Amino acid sequence: MNTLQCETMDNPVIKVADIEAPARCVVFDKDGTLIDFHAIWGPRLARGATALAEAADLGDEFLAHLYRAAGYDPDNGMTSGQGPLATAPLHQFTVIAASVVYQHGIIWDKALELSQNYIGEAMTAKPAAEEIIPKGPLTRSLQQLKNADIQTAIATTDNRSATEAMIGTLGLATFFADIRCGDDAGPVKPDTAVLENIAMGLKLKVADLIMVGDTVSDLAMARKAGAALCVGVTGGAGSVAQLQPHADVLIKDIGQIRPA
């Protein structure tokens, strides 16, 4: 068994797969970590992109260009773990989409309007229950951590309304001590200040946090910030090959995180 050492040895010890680390808080990404990524974002992009193409009389070449720019493969429904669909806050993503519209002959102001009206609307719609598919035994895992006096938090680039809808649908509101979203004022992922602010708000150090996410962006942020452990979740936006060099450990879902 591999045990990671930390200055704060009075912290509870958390076991992640076969690794143990002392920490007081586990910070989770949302999509691809707590819930299935692919059930939401690829279909939403496809709906918004198709509606935009019809409204602006743009064809298949435009759609192919937009999907490439987003990091989305419509043939297999998979998203690049290092592309903007997986990592960019939604307000940035609509600008990326608008730039593709502009490159297909539509003036910038109109391109931005179209992107906001179609892509933005599709991406920010309140999630339906069938879009919220939990990854693993969320309630059981979070309850185990809570019982051991280990706090939990969420750091996501998704908007707060969608994040709170997910938490409400799955009945997880009692578990999270802090939630940081992409449309909040202040820093957003992958800025290390997100983890620094979570730690500060909980009267902890970043070294007291474990970061759990499904993208290189999540793990690189955690490593740069000095988190106690960088945990990659497979089956989300990031592939095993992408995540492996940046993770201390890979897991299939958060059921593999528990008090030691």
Image (cartoon, rainbow, N blue to C red):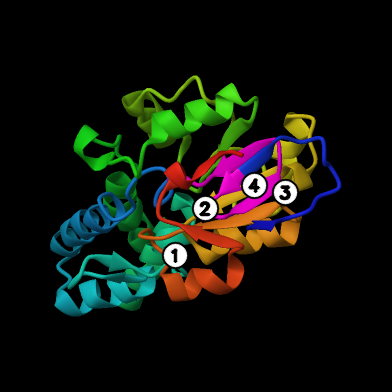
Residue bearing the label numbered 3: 193
- N-terminal of the pair, mark 2 or mark 1, is 2
Q: Element at badge 2?
A: loop
Quadrant in which residue 2 is drawn: bottom right
**Front tag of 3 and 4:** 4
**Left or right of residue 38, residue 184 in this image:** right
Cα separation between marks 3 and 1: 20 Å
Say few, some or many: other residues with alpha carbon within 10 Å of mark 2 (under 14 / 14 to 19 / 20 or more): some
Image location of residue 237, percent across then percent down = 39, 62
Q: Is residue 69 above or below residue 254?
A: below
Image location of residue 244, percent across then percent down = 53, 71
Residue bearing the label numbered 4: 210
Mark drawn on residue 84: 1
Q: Element at badge 1?
A: helix
Say few, some or many: other residues with alpha carbon within 10 Å of mark 4 (under 14 / 14 to 19 / 20 or more): many
Cα separation between marks 3 and 4: 15 Å
Mark drawn on residue 70: none
The structure residue drawn at horizontal position 74% and vertical position 38%, both measured from the top left corner, is: 199
Say few, some or many: other residues with alpha carbon within 10 Å of mark 1 (under 14 / 14 to 19 / 20 or more): some
Q: Quadrant of the N terminus?
A: bottom right
Residue bearing the label numbered 2: 17
Q: Quadrant of the C terminus?
A: top right
- Range shown magenta: 15-30
**Front tag of 2 and 1:** 2
The structure residue drawn at horizontal position 43% and vertical position 35%, both measured from the top left corner, is: 163
- N-terminal of the pair, mark 3 or mark 1, is 1
Image location of residue 208, percent across then percent down = 75, 42
Amino acid type, label 1: Pro
